[in-house]
Amino acid sequence: MRSSIPFFILAASAFSSAIVLPTANDPQILSALTTNTKSSNAEEQRLIQLSPFETRWVTEEQKLELKRQGRNFMDITEHPDLGLQNAIATATAQKKHITFPEKPAFQDTIKPLLKKLNKKNIKANLEKFTSFYTRYAKSDYGRQSSEWLLNRINETANAYPGLELAPFKHSWKQSSIIARIPGRTEKTVVIGAHQDSINLFLPNLLGAPGADDDGSGTVTILEAFRVLVQYLAESGTQLEQTVEFMWYSAEELGLLGSQAIFSAYEKEGRDVVAMLQQDMTGYVEKTLNAGKPESVGVITDFVDEGLTEFIKGVITEYCDIPYTLTKCGYACSDHASASKAGYPSAFVIESAFEDSDKHIHTTEDKIEYLSFDHMLQHAKLTLGLALELGSTKQWTESKGDKSGGEL
Ligand SMILES: [Zn+2]
């Protein structure tokens, strides 16, 4: 990081006249680059980003207060340069623009596999995952829940020897996890959920079962992963694209785990062609009580339009319920980290955002409020998307500024 500072500042000033670079031009971000922020006392100042153009120094307690008020943000203290290479590529018209397939094309393979998704597995995994007192990322419980998850993924993938499974370690106790299914190419499709939970009142003391947020997303993608690797092992198939399942740590602390991963990916020049985040996949009560149809909430703000359009087609093709379009604001989950790195990213949630689960971030975020049938629908979407984009042979890619270079 230290050796990259001169280049960073140089790059920021070189392109500042050609493009608005909120990250690179912000004096607070530049100061974060040169400030040692490793200390961990309560008064430690953290730099948060509340929108593409708004940053602020706050304490950990102020972060919690913002979250209690429903404000989302990225804590960019450790990765203030995430998105820099994306910004430069955009400014120099080198940014890659991907055109996604017009519609799903692998029904013959995927439809029989959907029947293998089993909500009993989803339920058993969620019961165990929510039995940890909390999955707060800085706690020993959070470390233990992550170790259990890693073992569970490993057991689930037993039949598939090609898998590369590893924890992605952080400076806090709970690791993120990446399960990589190598394809014929390095082009990578990412399926994500976050594994940590939080009690926003006293995170170090109070329990946080985090059944919906985001235990539900964690076990939903795990079940899709199970059926996918079993299919690949039994049929001897290698996908065209590499597919990576990721379980992020510390989403609740400002998308810390996903920023660390996508910052590394951006620096390594990884070719991520699509990223889908699922954060809360199990609560439908409010939707049904309002007399609305159960549906998958497709987020339309701060996401890649082309990928989101394709996901709508995947839901229509492979799910038994429709989708509804909804918004959740800036940095509302880990797809924001991938998006900042320049990767096409999307987000789906259990319902329209206003009908989503209000028990989250408390001791009341429990399994008893959730629908495993609904999680199964999200698992169908996940398996459908992973196999569709994993199998696509022809990608239309062009360079230019069509994406607008969102930061
Ligand atoms: Zn969440």
Image: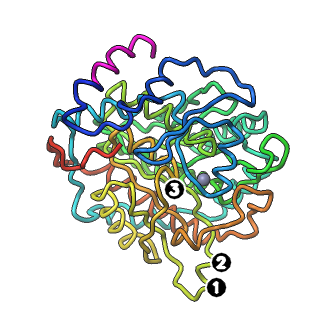
- Residue corresponding to mark 2: 285
- Residue corresponding to mark 3: 278
Q: Is residue 170 above or below residue 405?
A: above
Place of residue 370 in the rendered image (x, y in percent of width and height, measured from the top left) = 68, 69
Place of residue 172 in the rendered image (x, y in percent of width and height, measured from the top left) = 67, 28
268 or 37: which is nearer to us? 37
For the N terminus, the quadrant is: top left
- Residue corresponding to mark 1: 289
The answer to the question of whether label 2 and label 3 lie on touching residues, with beta carbons closer than 8 A, is no
Q: Please tell me whether mark 3 sits on a helix, a strand or a loop.
A: strand
Q: Residues within 10 Å of mark 3 (few under 14, many from 20)?
A: many
Asked if the stretch drawn in magenta spans residue 66, the answer is no
- Point out which mark residue 76 bears: none
* Mark nearer the N terminus (2 vs 3): 3
The answer to the question of whether label 2 and label 1 lie on touching residues, with beta carbons closer than 8 A, is yes
Q: Residues within 10 Å of mark 1 (few under 14, many from 20)?
A: few
- Dot 1 amino acid type: Asn
Q: Residues within 10 Å of mark 2 (few under 14, many from 20)?
A: some
Q: Is mark 3 within 8 Å of ligand 1?
A: no
Which numbered mark, 3 or 1, is in the foreground of this view?
A: 1
- Dot 3 amino acid type: Gln
Place of residue 87 in the rendered image (x, y in percent of width and height, measured from the top left) = 29, 35
- Taking the spot 51% from the left edge, 38% from the top edge, the residue there is 258
**Left or right placement of residue 239 versus residue 380 in this view:** left
Q: Please tell me whether mark 2 sits on a helix, a strand or a loop.
A: helix
Alpha-carbon span between mark 2 and mark 1: 6 Å
- Dot 2 amino acid type: Glu
* Mark nearer the N terminus (3 vs 1): 3
Report which quarter residue 217 is drawn in.
bottom right
**Residue range of the region highlighted in magenta in the rendering:** 1-11
